[in-house]
Amino acid sequence: MEVILLQDVKNVGKKGDIVTVNDGYGRNVLLKKKQAVEATNKNRNDLKLKKANDDKIAAENLEAARQLGEKIEASKITIPIKVGAGGKSFGSVSSKEIAEEVKKQLGYDIDKKKVLLKDAIKAAGEYDVKIKLHTQVTAALKVIVEGKE
């Protein structure tokens, strides 16, 4: 019996795969638990259309991420940090603060988990901070940290 998997099934296959299984296992387990549907011509065509639509959406998301990456790389943000006597800073600039400033200054809503910082920024200066927008797109944002007393 050929079935189209609706979700990942251990030792059988991944979601969207067309697999051949024993008739009893297919009817009594996979179909009853709604983990699969029979691989009829209609279901095969539906799967093909769904995969084409998913590919189109993925391509659109990638293109949108590339465009946002270009906009981010062309811009810069300024973040103030408190400093004491002798230019010693109090605290640091974290990825959360960078994400908030990007939203405030540039208007782009970026998750703080997407801001890639090795260490928190603890001194005034100019830094290139990587922002992961997509699995294939990473943008470099110029962050200027200014000391204020």
Image (spheres, grey):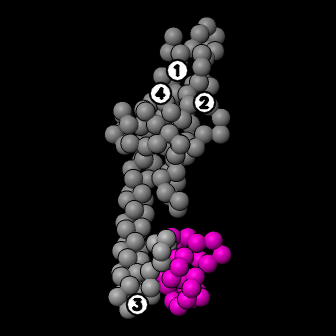
Q: Is residue 142 visible?
A: no
Q: Earlier in the sequence, mark 4 or mark 3?
A: 3
Amino acid type of the residue tagged 1 in the rendering: Ile
Q: Percent x, y for residue 135?
A: 53, 59
* Residue ID at (49%, 30%): 97
Q: Which residue is mark 1?
A: 81
Q: Percent x, y for residue 128?
A: 55, 41
Spatial CA distance of label 2 from label 1 is: 10 Å
SS for callout 2: loop
Q: Earlier in the sequence, mark 2 or mark 1?
A: 1
Tell whether label 4 touches label 2 (CB within 8 Å). no
Tell whether label 1 touches label 2 (CB within 8 Å). yes
Spatial CA distance of label 1 from label 4 is: 7 Å
Q: Which residue is mark 2?
A: 121
Q: Dot 3: within a 10 Å radius of its alpha carbon, few (fewer than 14), some, or many (20 or more) residues?
A: few
SS for callout 3: loop
Q: Which residue is mark 3?
A: 40
Q: Which mark is residue 79?
A: 4
